[in-house]
Amino acid sequence: MINYNPKDWFNFIFHVHKADTIRKLWPLMLSVAVFSGLVAYLELYYFRVYINDTVKNISMMHSLLGFVISMLLVFRTNTSYDRWWEGRRLLGQLTNVSRNLAIKLKALRLDKKELEFFNYAIPKYAFALKEHLREKQYFGKNSLLIEVDGGKHIPNQVAASINSRIIQLNLDGKLTGEQLLMLTPEITAFTDICGGCERIKNTPIPFSYSAF
């Protein structure tokens, strides 16, 4: 996440050229500017359309078209912001779920070996989810604690490992049924968060908005 002071807008004006959005859009913006300049030059100096009475009021059409495009841009901006805000909520939920699961497991007074597994697996899920959403299969070096198959859904494999370990603790008598039920919501929340992030990633902005 990028940390910045939202009140320091004056300084941002002089660094707008460093923004990622400007870097991606400047070739397209330059192309549109050149094309618009060429069309304006042809209209004014070659076709001399300003002399023709039939096109004198064409500026009215431009104003109306500009209003329509501005409305579409508003809808597109709102849609993009909703997607960003929902993604931010899911990442915040991932942080809370990870903390809650860690706090509950620590309170159960498990042995050192089991705590070592969960200390490794819980933050590793967040890392695996980040790489998965970026369409990377990198998990890091396989540990003796968790082994994953790089060709499959890695976040699900990590969540399955955590779930399997908790169920095994229950079967070994180290966790009661009530404690197992207490931990279950956090485990299922991992998969819910992953599904929400995948939905945002795989659902494009409607073409009618993205075209503008």
Image (cartoon, rainbow, N blue to C red):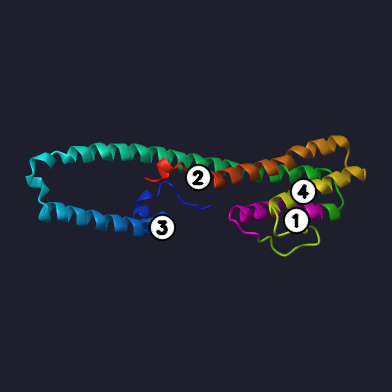
Label 1 or label 4, whichever lies nearer to me, is 4
User: Which type of secondary structure does the marked residue at label 3 adopt?
Assistant: helix
Q: Is 153 within the magenta?
A: no
Label 4 or label 2, whichever lies nearer to me, is 2
Residue position marked by numbered label 2 in the rendering: 204
User: Which type of secondary structure does the marked residue at label 4 adopt?
Assistant: helix
Residue at 50% in and 52% down = 3
Residue extending farthest right: 173
Residue 199, horizontal then vertical, whole percent: 58, 43
Residue position marked by numbered label 3 in the rendering: 24
**Sequence-wise, which precedes: disc 3 or disc 4?**
3
Query: Marks 3 and 2, how far apart in space?
Result: 18 Å
Pointer 4 local density, CA inside 10 Å: few below 14, some 14–19, many at least 20: some
Pointer 3 local density, CA inside 10 Å: few below 14, some 14–19, many at least 20: few
Which amino acid lies under the numbered mark 3 shown in the image of this protein? Lys
**Sequence-wise, which precedes: disc 1 or disc 3?**
3
Residue at 74% in and 59% down = 149
Which amino acid lies under the numbered mark 4 shown in the image of this protein? Ala
Query: Marks 3 and 4, how far apart in space?
Result: 39 Å
Query: Marks 4 and 2, how far apart in space?
Result: 29 Å
Label drawn at residue 120: 1
Residue position marked by numbered label 4 in the rendering: 160
What type of secondary structure mainly makes up the magenta span?
Answer: helix
Q: Is 159 rendered above or below residue 57? A: below
Query: Marks 1 and 4, how far apart in space?
Result: 14 Å
Q: Is 134 within the magenta?
A: yes
Position of residue 21 in the picture relative to residue 103 (left or right): left
